[in-house]
Amino acid sequence: MSETKSKEVPLMEKITSLCKRRGYIYQSSEIYGGIGGFWDYGPLGAELKRNLRDAWWCAMTRDREDVLGLDATIIMHPAIWKASGHVDTFADMMRECTLTNKRVRADHVDPQSGTVMQYSGAESPTGWKLTRTFSALLRQGEHIESFRKRVRGLLALNAGEAAGAVEAIVLSGEEKGATVENSVDFHPETSGLLNEARPFNLMLSTLVGPTATEENRAYLRPETAQAIFAQFKNVFDSSRIKVPFGICQIGKAFRNEVTPKNFTFRSREFEQMELEFFIAPDEAIQLIHGSVATWSETADLSTPQPNWGWEMWHRYWVDQRTKFYATIGLGTDVLDYYWQQPADLAHYARACVDILFKFPFGTEELEGIAARGDFDLTQHQKHSGKSLEIFDEELRTAAAKLSDAEKQAFTDNVISAWEADWTSKGKSGDEARAAALTFCEKLLKGTYLPHVIEPSAGLDRLALAIISNGFVEEEKADVNGKKELRTFLRLHPKIAPVKCGVFPLLKNRPELVTKAREVNALLKKHFNCFYDESGAIGRRYARQDEVGTPYGVTIDFETLGEKGPELADTVTVRERDSGAQERVKIDALVAYLTGRLA
Ligand code: ATP
């Protein structure tokens, strides 16, 4: 038996096709030709997502004492997005094709070589005329006549009916320009010359209320995290919780992605699962505990300690998230980590690691875990004018024990550390000193703005990772030695959409069907089951294997006691991956499956 699990691009086509055929994922609005970057989850996809959501929710909040949940609205006060920086900076750099006006992300342009062909315009006998100049690349190896035809076709497509027949379009003032090698100045699809890169904001917006004026402009959230910051104080005040603690949320987010691609990987509507874990600034830990535990290769991350600084907490969450992925079948063999370099980091971030998954189309981000300092709460405090600081009695008590000289020494240390840090980032040393002084004055009274560690994952990307990871094609010889290709989804039982298939061996034997219905009713109270009586039993197994159902229960003649009383009321339980079968008593079935589905 040989297992093939090739990761080349056609694999993605097989996965996409399985998803549609078996009810995992469909293109949104497909009957109208679809809408780019939007996907619907069918019956099995909906179950898979629900299971993943539940697994994340339990791991992040229910199973912990230090994380609370939130469910905020998609549309929030637009000032939130100004404060967070999304209005001004949540943009991709875009370039526009001078031939077709098609846009492309500046960092998504593949190098091309060829000869630049310039034109002063184009016209057609219908009266349609293009009076602007444009250029396009005659690609290396492309015949000039097919190039001209391609350019005319693109112009006609852009102009619509006005241009008339493609053949009738005349290109004016053709001139041969420079020969270029590996240039990134031409549109990857059209080969039209690209103009300068300009920022393109990724937020989708709408108008709220009956008066459709710009003052009513609101945004569909591009991430769920900002609601957590905006509600931080409410959650803190209403929950009798102390720092360190977290607030997590699962919900829809929207981004007007320029080039949605790779199936659901980059969508315009998607779901995020985010945690903001609030911690005390390292300076507060220093005051309370006398030192701050920082990370080293041998550090024990299993249990949080009171003297942990941001670095330990960041490492802890990377570890926790890695452990979470292992519980749903994504081990470190299929994950990778990208530690952002200082130059990649946002100005406020101290560290950021991307957890990557080896997708069939490449190793790409599944989740980002960032240490964001107090940037977000500072911004919201500033823009809302409401204090988001918290008071920490333990900190106040610790600070009160210091002599004036010790307080001064502490403050001086903080000031010089901040000054060095800010000036290394090109910021003003004077401002650093002033900010550090205010910070220390508050800290010594027990008050501060918490810092945050943010593990932020995408549910749709996770569902895609789970399906791609589970997809197996296996060549197997049947009883006559004939090779057959078996496709199955090796999903972890915990997140498989259907846990158990229930099959009467034969549909035309009422005793078998009645018993199978009884078994189905029994199991359905505990697990999501699928009852199937049509077709040969082998076909029914294969159908469930293909959607990742971990167990099949068959009610056969043994169950009815026809092969001896000792086998009466037992069923055949078949395991998906190995195909191994076992006889289990109906009374023991729930316990048998429960033990194996966790
Ligand atoms: P990318 O670099 O891939 O665009 P990002 O760094 O912008 O992602 P974040 O803003 O950190 O992503 O969002 C956190 C998580 O949300 C990502 O790790 C990903 O799982 C998910 N996510 C972000 N954008 C999309 C999208 N367009 N479609 C599906 N999931 C997304």
Image (cartoon, rainbow, N blue to C red):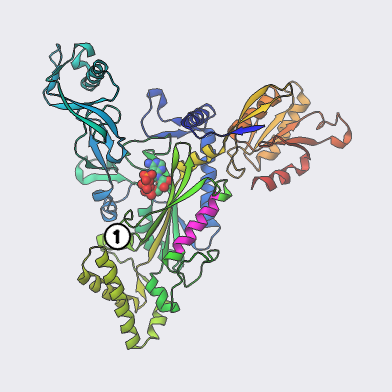
* Residue found 27% across the figure and 60% down from its top: 384
- Closer to us: 543 or 560: 543
Quarter of the image holding residue 353? bottom left
Q: Which residue is mark 1?
A: 380
Quarter of the image holding residue 501? top right
User: The magenta stretch spans which residues?
Assistant: 313-325
Question: Residue 58: in sight, yes or no?
Answer: no
Q: Position of residue 538 (x, y in %)?
A: 69, 26
Q: Is residue 236 above or below residue 104?
A: below
Q: Position of residue 187 (x, y in %)?
A: 26, 31
- Closer to us: 473 or 224: 473
> Which quadrant is the N terminus positioned in?
top right
Q: Main secondary structure of the magenta part?
A: helix
* Residue found 53% across the figure and 41% down from its top: 466
Label 1 residue SS: helix
Q: Position of residue 542 (x, y in %)?
A: 64, 28
Question: Residue 236: in sight, yes or no?
Answer: yes
- Ligand 1 falls in quadrant: top left
Is 356 on the left-hand or right-hand side of 584? left
Q: How many marks?
A: 1
* Residue found 73% across the figure and 32% down from its top: 554
Give neighbour class at mark 1: few <14, some 14-19, many 20+ (Cα, 10 Å): many
Q: Position of residue 476 (x, y in %)?
A: 67, 28
- Give amino acid for label 1: His
Is 99 in the magenta? no
* Residue found 51% across the figure and 50% down from its top: 56
Is 520 on the left-hand or right-hand side of 191? right
Is 319 in the magenta? yes
Q: Is label 1 within 8 A of ligand 1 (CB to nearest ligand atom)?
A: no
Q: Is residue 376 above or below residue 174?
A: below
- Closer to us: 427 or 57: 427
